[in-house]
Each structure stands twice: as structure tokens, then as C-alpha cells.
Amino acid sequence: MTLKPVRVGICGLGTVGGGTFNVLTRNADDIARRAGRPIVIEQVAYRSLNPECDLTGIKATTDVFEVATNPDVDVLVELIGGYDLSRELVLTAIANGKHVVTANKAMIAVHGNEIFKAAHEQGVIVAFEAAVAGGIPVIKSLREGLGANRIEWVAGIINGTGNYILTHMREDKRAFEDVLAEAQALGYAEADPTFDVEGIDAAHKLTILASIAYGVPLQFNKAFTEGISRITAEDIEQADNLGYVIKHLGISKRTEAGLELRVHPTLIPKQRLLASVYGVKNAIAIMGDAVGPTLYYGAGAGAEPTASAVVADLLDVARDISTDHHYRVPYLAFSGIGDEINRLPIMPMEDIVTAYYLRLLAVDRPGVLARVATILAEQGISIEALIQKEATEGELVPIILLTHRTREKQMNEAIRLIESMADIAGPVTRIRVESLDEQE
């Protein structure tokens, strides 16, 4: 029996949309054999024409909602990005009984609970593998391949721009601003790089991974986010001297008090696998109680790597399109919608326990270091390592401290007291440290 084709409407013909269009047309025969039926492009909507896409014989429009309401379209592929227009487009498609494939991590992280509820009520599929880590099939692995496991933690480099900047700051001994400008010139960073360098993009992705890992609602507004713009070449060098590499990590852990959900610069030991992920590559480490640690590595962005994930989702839709929605893999891995879903609380950042790297500039006079050590001790913070360098111009001494694990609340108070000292110049630089010993 020959199954009828699955007809696709692609909204957005930019980098990912163009890649998806070309992969679908170039590999049409192999895709049809894998899906058991052809997957054909019925219509596209675009703001500007992509010269790399041959639209001969394809219906085209500049109105994305025309695709969402087209009765000849079975699956809407949302690749326009952003929060609000994409939400409205996807909800319109769902209301019209269409399945949805999207690469939009921002929309899923912020509006996903609403979208999945609407899709469940309509009995349609919403697939979003390409929303996290580009072409790396980490969502499918976490949702299905690791389905037997109680997930203990997820830690990953999930933004290629930030990883590129930190990589070249370390390898080339260059300043943040210099490498950022290069990343923008190469197209790795946007003209406004805020989402990448301040961790917002990574927080979107971590929110999605944590929801799938632990069966909790999407809670982007509770994710702690800190960027890399204050990291200096000095910090990179001192981390290296101490046996660490600085990476911009998304980290989520299950604890007795709840779930950690945080994105920030992190010192990790050089021997850990994540420390060896360079350039624009992504990598996500996941700890399951049965399987132990697993690592997923590859291209986290780009036209065809991301298109690979989009088309893989289309294959899944083509296979499951005739299956009763009660028997499909749940959107966020666990059965239950709304109040039935796990309500593990997201921990406030001040309750997180980790080790710390501190860098401060102090006036070169007796008693200053002793006072700093006393402040830390009064907050119950013990020092693991200390480096005091030669005085700089103006007789300021750079002091590097590595602490044992302590609660963020205590560290915040210690930093406040240290910065209030008359002999301390400027703010204290604080970078969290994850040894990963218990995790890998």
C-alpha cells in the first residue's frame, strides 16, 4: 500500500529555512524511503527570497498565516524565530489541525506550556528537536533513548557564539571585545549579541532540556542567567594555571531541595570532556542513574546541521501522523498536562552550593589579605588555593582565590563585605567552579 504524501508548509526561508528546503528537495528519495511515504513541500512563506532555494513549482507567499490556514498543508514548519508572531502562527496552525515542526527555542521556552496544551487538545504533534543544539539529536536521546533513567543532571555548552569567544580568548590570549568583534565579522554573533553573550539563548535551551529531563513545566522565568562579558584574559590565564578551563555552561541538577536551573561562566577541570569542546561546537553531558554519564557533541547551529534536525522531526511526524495521539511520545517526555505534571520546585540561585573562583585587586599593605580571609571564614567559606601576584601600577596586588563548596547566599554576603573594604579596588570577579567529579 502506498501512503499519501505528507505536505509541508515552510514559514521562513532564512538560514535554517533555506537549509531545510534544500535538504528536503535534495534528499527526497532517501527521506521518502525512511518515512514510508513522500514528504513534499506544498508552500513556502518568506519575508525575503533566498537565492539558494529553487522555488519552481512551489506555491509561495509573504503571508505566513496563509500557510497556517492552507487546507492542503499537513505540517507547518515554523522557522521565523522570535516570541510573539511565531506563537500566534503556531497556535493558528494547531487550531487548523496542522502538525508543527519548529526550531524556535525562544518560543518553546516561553510559550511552550500553552502550545503543548493546545496541541494535546487538537491531537496534533509539535516537534522541536532543532530548538536545542542544532543538529545534535539530544532531545530525542533525552526523551526516548534515556527513557529508562532517572536523570540526575544536565550540563552543556549550548551556545556556539559564547564558546567561540572563550575558546579564542584562551588560545590567542585576546580580550573579550576583540574576539566578539571577530565573531560578528564571521557571522557567528549578531550585531546585537546580547542573547548569546549574556546567556539568554542558552537559558532558553536549558529550560527545554530540564523540562524533558525531569518532567516539569517549562519555567524560563526561573532560570538564573549570567553572561561572559566580564570575563578577562587574566581570568582565562589564572584558570589555566589552576588546572581549569572557563566555559559558559547551562547546568541543571536534581537535588533534595528541588531543581537547579542556571547558566553562567564556569571553571571545569581540564581533563573533563566538556573542557575540550572548542570553537562554535556544542556538547551536552547527561547523567542517568542507569546508564551513567553520556555526552552528545556536534554542530549546534548552521543551515544544514539544524535542517538535519528539522527534517528528522518531519520524518517522525510522517511516521506518527496516523497514530492516535494518546500513543505518541509525549511532547516533554512525561505523560500529564497542566497540574498532572511534576511540580519539583526550581531552586533560587542563592540556595545553590558550588565552589568559587574570586579575583580582586587590593592595596599592597599588611593585613589586607588577612581581612579578606577573615570575612570568608566568618561566612563559613574555606579557601582551597590562593595566588598573590606582584603589585601592579598604583601598588595594587591582584589576588586569586579558589574556595571550597559553599552556598551562594554566603558568597554574596562575603563579596559585599570584601568590596566595602577601603583597600579593595573595584568589583570582585566571581566565577563558579564545577569539578564534575561526582558527575562524570
Image (spheres, helix red, strand yellow):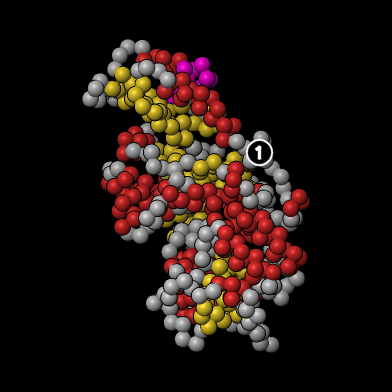
> The N terminus appears in which quarter of the rendering?
bottom right
The magenta stretch is 375-385
Q: Is residue 124 visible?
A: yes
Q: Callout 1: helix, strand or loop?
A: strand
Q: Is residue 410 magenta?
A: no
Question: Residue at horizontal 39%, vertical 28%?
Answer: 427
Residue bearing the label numbered 1: 258
Judging depth in this view, the residue of 336 and 355 nearest the camera is 336
- Left or right of 276 on screen, residue 96: right
Q: Quadrant of residue 326?
A: bottom right
Outermost residue toward the top in this view: 366
For this view, does 350 lie left or right of residue 122? left
* Residue 270 visible (yes or no): no
Mark 1, Cα crowd under 10 Å, few <14 / some 14-19 / many 20+, is: some
- Counting from the top left corner in percent of width and height, residue 76 is at 59, 72
Q: Amino acid at mark 1?
A: Gly
Question: Quick check: 271 left or right of 262?
Answer: left
In the displayed structure, would residue 99 be above or below residue 394? below
